[in-house]
Image (cartoon, grey):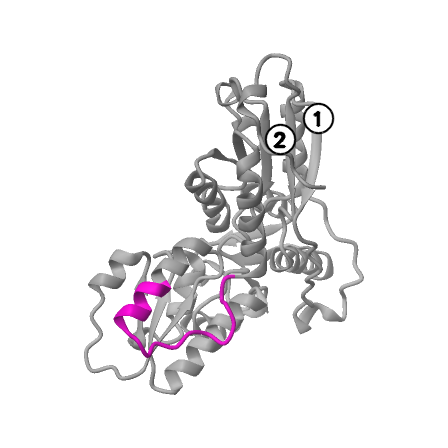
Amino acid sequence: MPLKPFDAAATGTGAEKKIFLLKPRGFCAGVVRAIDVVEIALQAYGPPIYVRKEIVHNRHVVDGLRNAGAIFVDELSDVPFGARTIFSAHGVSPQVRAEARERKLRVIDATCPLVTKVHLEAVKFAREGYTIVLIGHKDHDEVVGTLGEAPERTHLVSDVGDVDALEISGATRVCYLTQTTLSLDETRDIVERLKQKFPLIQGPPAQDICYATENRQMAVKAVAPFCQLLLVVGSRNSSNSKRLVEVCDNHGVRSYLVDDAEHIDPAWLGEVRNVAVTAGASAPENLVQGVIESLRSSGFRNVEEVELIEEEVRFSLPPELAQISGLTPISYP
């Protein structure tokens, strides 16, 4: 249904308070797959199941899986020798895989296939003698894993300023890759500056920023002219969730990242009559509905779902679990 332009003159006490509920929102195919991996492994093998890092960047999801018997660790050294271990959706470096082999860990790899795509591109470019410029956020789990594929040939940049300061001496072949959860607009600016500095630079065969990140950002851009406030449901360490806030801010609309309904500040609502709600790719729908109910209690009783594009992407389970995928998933709060 087409949106009606926001009319600032219609924000008096008689104006109807409305929620624009964006779709697509919330879980992407990679997150669904990663959570399914942990749930099915717990049912098939029983706890404990060790998970390196947060399986996805959402506190509620992680807490639910922890309550079901998953044990989350920062490093493989915290995993008992030979234990069953899951790699998170963000991927790991070859060094981590080697350590897992040394410790005889029974690994189930929940890396998102779109992250694996970037890893494979890094390996290919490195083998062909390219110097790789990786666009991403330092210390993010995904970036750490990708950097590990060819650390001696890879330079990390996070913004245009990093590109300006980048020095690559003697390299005749340069390429760029990106983290999958970046801002489309900021990445475009960085790539443009790279092309100015390295006119022969090569990019990936297809965009590295994932479909879900792009779709959620495009939805925010589409609704920004029609709302006064945007609430993004997602955790503070979720890159794609933070990017949604930045996209809306860049379009002149106040926006806030909330972990759940309890984090909504009533002062934000003030004179607001039109609020948009979306969710990062690792935020479960029950948290979104909690935010909707909270807004309803504040007078936002008209909810209009705005669907910009239909997502039908599905990823198959890792081969270790494909044979036992008929088990009933564990529910989390």
Q: What's the amino acid at mark 2?
A: Val
Q: Where in the figure is residue 267, as x and y percent of width and height? A: 48, 19
Residue range corresponding to the magenta coloring: 191-209
Between the residue at mark 1 and the residue at mark 2, the CA separation in whole angstroms equals 14 Å
| Residue at the spot 55% in from the left edge and 67% down from the top edge | 114
| Residue at the spot 73% in from the left edge and 56% down from the top edge | 43
| Residue 281 appears in view | no
- Which of the numbered marks, if any, corresponds to residue 291? 2
Closer-to-camera residue (268/95): 268
| Residue at the spot 63% in from the left edge and 18% down from the top edge | 15
Q: Where in the figure is residue 87, as x and y percent of width and height? A: 54, 63
In the image, is residue 79 part of the stretch drawn in magenta? no
Mark 1 and 2 residues: CB-CB less than 8 Å, in contact? no
Closer-to-camera residue (135/306): 306
In the image, is residue 205 part of the stretch drawn in magenta? yes
Up-down: is 135 above or below 308?
A: below
CA neighbours of label 1 inside 10 A, class few (<14), some (14 to 19), many (20+): few
Main secondary structure of the magenta stretch = loop
| Residue 177 appears in view | yes
Q: Nearer the viewer, mark 1 or mark 2?
A: 1
Residue that sits furthest to the bottom in the current view: 128
Mark found first going from the N terminus, 1 or 2: 2
Q: What's the amino acid at mark 1?
A: Asn
Q: Which residue is mark 1?
A: 302
| Residue at the spot 58% in from the left edge and 47% down from the top edge | 219
Task: Classify mark 2: helix, strand or loop.
Answer: helix
CA neighbours of label 2 inside 10 A, class few (<14), some (14 to 19), many (20+): many
**Which image quarter is the N terminus in?**
top right
Closer-to-camera residue (39/181): 181
Task: Classify mark 1: helix, strand or loop.
Answer: strand
